Image (spheres, helix red, strand yellow):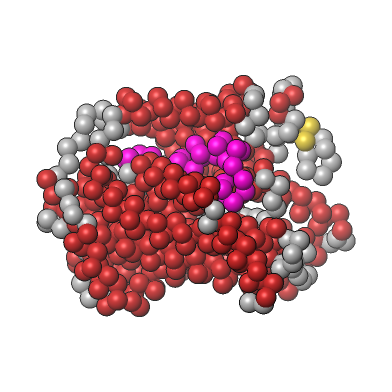
Amino acid sequence: MGDEENNLLLEAIGNVASLEVLLVTLAAACYGLAVGSIPGLTATMAVALMVPLTAYLSDVQAITAIVTTVTCSIFAGDLPATLLRIPGTPASAAYANDAYALTKKGKAKAALATCLWFSIIGGLFGTLVLALAAPQLAALATQFTSYEYFWLYVLGLSCAVTVSNDSRLRGMMAMLLGLLLSTVGLATDFSTPRMTFGWNELITGVHFIPAMIGLFGLSEVLKNILHVPTASIASDGNAQVNPNQGIAQVMQMSWRRKWSTVRSSFIGSLIGMLPGAGADIASWISYATSKRFSKQPTEYGKGSEEGLADATGANNAALGGAWIPALVFGIPGDSVTAIALGVLLTKNISPGPAIFEASPENSQLVLVLSLYVVFVLANLMLLPLGLVAIRAGTALVRIPRNLLLPLIVLFCVVGSYSMSGSYFDVWVMLVMGVLGFGLERLKIPLGPAVLGLIMGGALEHRFIQSITTSGSLLDFVSRPMAAVLATVCVLLWLGPLLVKRNADQ
């Protein structure tokens, strides 16, 4: 790094080290740990409920709140998974059986210490990949034209469909629904009202924040009301643990299995870069890879500490990886970064290659460097707070549903209204909440719908920009990088079909 970059990095560290940001970090960490430890409440929902508060925070404070919340909530989801075999977040589902099996064997402290330590290692590894890979991709992206960006958006949506659900048909339906919602309001390039149905409030389109709060907040409430039993869940006697006794042993295991740890963290970072994948997909893939190369594959699902370590490292590493396409191309890697992109846009910060250009006037680069520092701070803070959360875990998983769910509904309503002071946004939140609940009942993933809603306008703009400047459709693949991206998109859709056909023959 040159002197200019060093000065910007020192400025970023100074911004994060301010008392206000540190207090936001502490509050967001406690909030994330509390929400993540409650079964049925996801990290995405925690971030969605926090978004209205970011309107009163600075850009650094807002990003700090989001990053810290999701970092801590992803780990906190391991608490009910270990103590009750109920994943606190989807990212914990891959190894819930192993974690609970260890608890039944009297190894709850080892399981929780493993989750905590490898979550921190994975999170720091993902931050390193983010810091190294994002600027390099940004340098490549400066050579992109509208054709490359068009295919890049198509690739992002294709990835969301192909990796987010077992059924590509359901994923495609969700994506098309999101794209349809993105067309509501004034057209991107011609300012023609579309599908407003006479409501002036829809001229500006479906507002992103109320839609996200409804999809990930209210839909979770509806799901909990209809599916989660109201009876209290008694925890196993082994749940009372002293995690301090297990950290030293886990540190030794991480050094013994250092290459496996690097492999799982790298997989998590790589999967996190795929739009629509996220921490839960990274966790499943890393768990499967760990089992494939393990000397004791029969232990997996019955209390494997190796599988637990690799999967928890991967899901936290994915958090940093998800920010790479978000910062460089404006394509969110998962639902959380999708929400974060919405927050950045409200702060008049536009992701893209230009934010990585080092200059004294580029305040956006300072924000990017602050993001790196925040990721490191959030993961380091997770160690002491995680130990406290483990001790308090048995109390957090017992919060009565009849107290919790009404509070979440209240936050959803207040959050939707406070963004623009509009009751119409509250109705948008309610409609999107019912829609999200219905989609999940039909096993249609929300991820592709979210990406379609966010990226639909940009995709339309790049398509119109390209089609109006080209003399033929062949121009869409005339440039080498555009041709490569188009080929990858085609392979994503046709590859599985060809593999299945060859297998049948």
82, 93: nearer the viewer: 82
Question: Where, quadrant-wise, is the C terminus in this rendering?
Answer: bottom left
Q: What's the residue at 56%, 68% (across, down)?
A: 131
The quadrant in which residue 409 appears is top left
394, 405: nearer the viewer: 394
379, 191: nearer the viewer: 379
Number of numbered discs visible in the structure rendering: 0
Q: Position of residue 150 (x, y in %)?
A: 71, 58
Up-down: is 108 above or below 402? below
Is there any visible trace of residue 483 in the rendered image?
no
Toward the front, the furthest residue is 19
Along the horizontal axis of the image, is 266 left or right of 99? right
Along the horizontal axis of the image, is 178 left or right of 503? right
Q: Position of residue 474 (x, y in %)?
A: 79, 65
Range drawn in magenta: 38-63
Is 435 within the magenta? no
Along the horizontal axis of the image, is 438 left or right of 205? left
